[in-house]
Amino acid sequence: MIYADMVLVNGNILTMNPSKPLAQAIAVKDDKIVEVSTDAEIRPWIGKHTKILDLKKRTVVPGLIDTHIHIEEFGRTMAEINLRDVRSIKEMQEKLKKCVQRAPKESWVLGHGWDQDRLKEKRYPTRWDLDKFSPNNPVLFTRVCGHVCVLNSKALELIGVTREAVPPFGGQIDKDAKTSEPTGILRENAMDLAWKAVPEPSEEELTKACGLACQKAVESGLTSVHWLISSQAEILVIQKLRAENRLPIRVYIMIPVDFLNHLTDLGLRTGFGDDMVKIGGVKILADGSLGARTAALAEPYDDDPSTKGMSLYSQEQLDALVAKAHKAGLQLAIHAIGDQAVGMVLTALEKALKKEPKRRYRHRVEHASVLNERLIQRMKKLGVMATVQPHFVISDFWVVDRVGLKRARWVYPFKTLIQKSVLIAGSSDCPVEPISPLLGIYAAVARKAFADEGISVDEALCLYTVNAAYASFEENIKGSIEVGKLADFVVLSHDPCKVLPDKIRDIEVEMTIVGGKMMYAKSPMEKA
Ligand SMILES: [Zn+2]
């Protein structure tokens, strides 16, 4: 007789398997599920060495999956000044002042998370706001969306941005209308000028940051992440963490399009790797963000009729990149927030699919924020998924100002997408939004803005389990609690289906199990 290594009993198990949605017990052997049943039925699996975990009626869901997360940035921002809660320029200055006092001479001071709409002054911060408190240390504060930043004068001087400076393609250097002096605000590709000057973290610092971020992910109930890397260094870190047994979650690596030629030259395809680390898709950035008015809209912004945002590629450029990746067997994950950008992405995908219709593909539009009926139809017809971030519904409280009521109705229309059979998968876009998938589920269910687009708890769970597994071609090994699948689960303090929608955000992750191993336990008693 074969016995299980571990059994979980006396639970309220939401399996996400429609043919057997509820269970009491799970048996695990090695890293896989061998039985899902009642407590009585699980007994034959219990041998002398089987570990028994009494769930005490608590709820278990499949391991949650985040399909769009910047692990390295998240790890690094943990060491930066957090400006998310700042409500005035003065508060920003106070945080800066404190940090500069401790910072080594001339070292860069980094911060992130500000949002001009949340500032009392309702304007962008400027270099002059920062200069007063940091005349000698260069300062770089990134906006909450990551698409805009503000520098102080010292930083502008170091990177050589003056009145005469010309922005790179797809970027913008804000200048004072009267004096033409740069205000300190850099947008989109112009931010690279600054990032190039910030010293790269050492391998040790990077490993530490990523390790910390992965640990936070497990504590939040994540067992798999689609990790958007931005450099070769991150792939090295992933391998290092894995080799040293310090990688607590499964990783699907999303690779920037800058590396497309390397991938195709080597013949690397989506799915190469194993259950812990896999090559994922190719990430392309088609436009910016709504918050910064750089998302490409078909019609001008409501609160700034002088702009429609910016497309970062021409249609021809986009077509060529998409065709190349598609032909090479690589999944595409294209960031498109404005309706104009989404339309361009779909056009590029249509063309690529027409040329190579036989390739298996599950291409994704990342964010897909501003939609309309026509775009949703096109997505459905193409079988293109949307990788959405429900928490944006809460953070983008200004969305009606940006795009007006008529278009705002079509921003993050989750319910309509589901009704129209467009597959949507859940994610955080952390550090842009908080990492917790439960907060994402809460935002999708307890939706206040355009409440008709709110979805059920079951649908929201689907976003972070079944659909997210599909998004990485892994629906046969994860996403639900079924015999033969990987033993990835999360134990929750409460059943999200049984609490009031507003209480979902208070649900705590009590344990996270990855491949049958307890990777996190809130109570140390249960860890053993
Ligand atoms: Zn992102």
Image: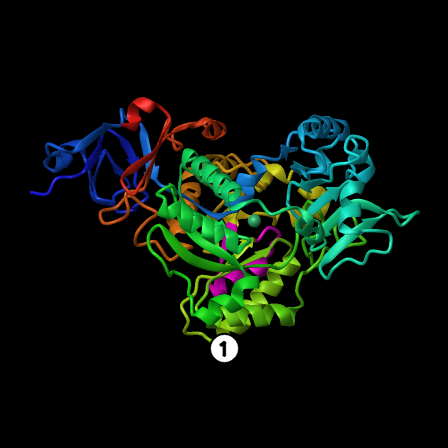
Q: Judge by depth and name the residue closer to the eye, 382 or 254.
A: 254
Can residue 67 be seen by looking at this rendering?
Answer: yes
Q: Residue furthest left?
A: 1
Q: Residue furthest bottom?
A: 355
Q: What's the magenta region?
A: 368-387
Residue 127 x/y as whole percent: 80, 40
**Could you tell me which residue is drawn at 23 percent across and 29 percent down?**
53
**Could you tell me which residue is drawn at 79 percent across and 44 percent down?**
184
Q: Judge by depth and name the residue closer to the eye, 400 or 261.
A: 261
Q: Quadrant of residue 1?
A: top left
Determine if the magenta segment contains residue 352.
no
Q: Judge by depth and name the residue closer to the eye, 152 or 253.
A: 152
Residue 262 x/y as whole percent: 50, 67
The answer to whether 151 is drawn above or below residue 327 in the figure is above
Residue 357 x/y as whole percent: 44, 74
Disc 1 marks which residue? Answer: 355
The answer to whether 102 is drawn above or below residue 476 in the figure is above
Can residue 424 be seen by looking at this rendering?
Answer: no
Quadrant in which the C terminus is drawn: top left
Q: Quadrant of residue 396?
A: top right
Q: Residue furthest front?
A: 105
Give, as a three-letter code, the residue at label 1.
Lys
The mark total stands at: 1
Q: Secondary structure at mark 1?
A: helix
Answer with left or right where residue 460 lies relative to residue 104: left
Residue 449 x/y as whole percent: 60, 38
**Could you tell me which residue is drawn at 10 percent across and 36 percent down?**
44
